[in-house]
Image: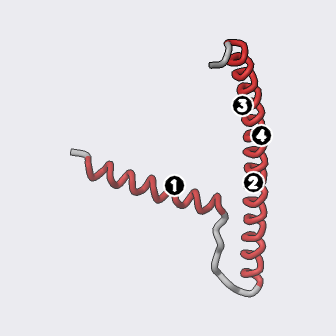
Amino acid sequence: MSSLKDTVDRLKSLEVEKLSLIAQVDDLRRLADAKADGLAIEINALKEELNQLMAVVGEEKHIMTPAETLKEKNFAYMKELAAKTLNQSP
C-alpha cells in the first residue's frame, strides 16, 4: 500500500501529464482545422477554374462550390420540412 505522500505525488504527476496531452490535442485540432480550411479553399479555386474552362470550350455544365451545394441541400430540406408541416396541419 502506498503512502499518502506517494499518492499525492502521483496525482500531481498525472494532472501535469493530462494538461500536456490536452495542449497537444488542442494544437493538433487547430492544425487539422487549418488543413481542412486550406483544402476547401483549394477545392473552390479548382471548381471555379473548371467552370471557367468549361465556359471557354462551350460546356454549359456548372460545378457547384461547397457553399452552393450546402445552400441547395438546405433549401431542399426546408422545402421538405414545409411540405411535411403543411400535410400535418388539421
Tell whether label 2 touches label 1 (CB within 8 Å).
no
**Mark sitting earlier along the chain (3/4):** 3
Answer few, some or many: residues within 10 Å of disc 4's Cα (few below 14, many 20 plus, some between 14 and 19): few
Q: Which colour scheme is used?
A: secondary structure
Q: Residues within 10 Å of mark 2 (few under 14, many from 20)?
A: few
Answer with mark 3 or mark 1, whichever residue precedes in sequence: 3
* Image-based side of 86 in relation to 35, left or right: left
Give residue 86's position: percent from left, percent from top: 30, 50
Secondary element at tag 3: helix
Q: Which residue sits at x=72%, y=81%? A: 54
Question: Do the CB atoms of the residues marked 3 and 4 lie less than 8 Å apart?
Answer: no
Mark 1 — residue? 74
Residue at 62 percent across and 19 percent down: it is 1
**In the rendered image of this protein, does residue 13 appear above or below residue 79?**
above
The location of residue 77, given as percent across then percent down, is: 45, 55
Residue linked to disc 4: 24
**Residue 37: mark:** 2
Above or below: residue 36 compared with residue 44: above
Disc 3 crowd rating (10 Å Cα; few below 14, some 14-19, many 20+) is: few
Q: Which residue is drawn at 73% across and 41% down?
A: 25
19 horizontally vs 71: left or right: right
The span from disc 2 to disc 3 (Cα, nearest Å) is 29 Å
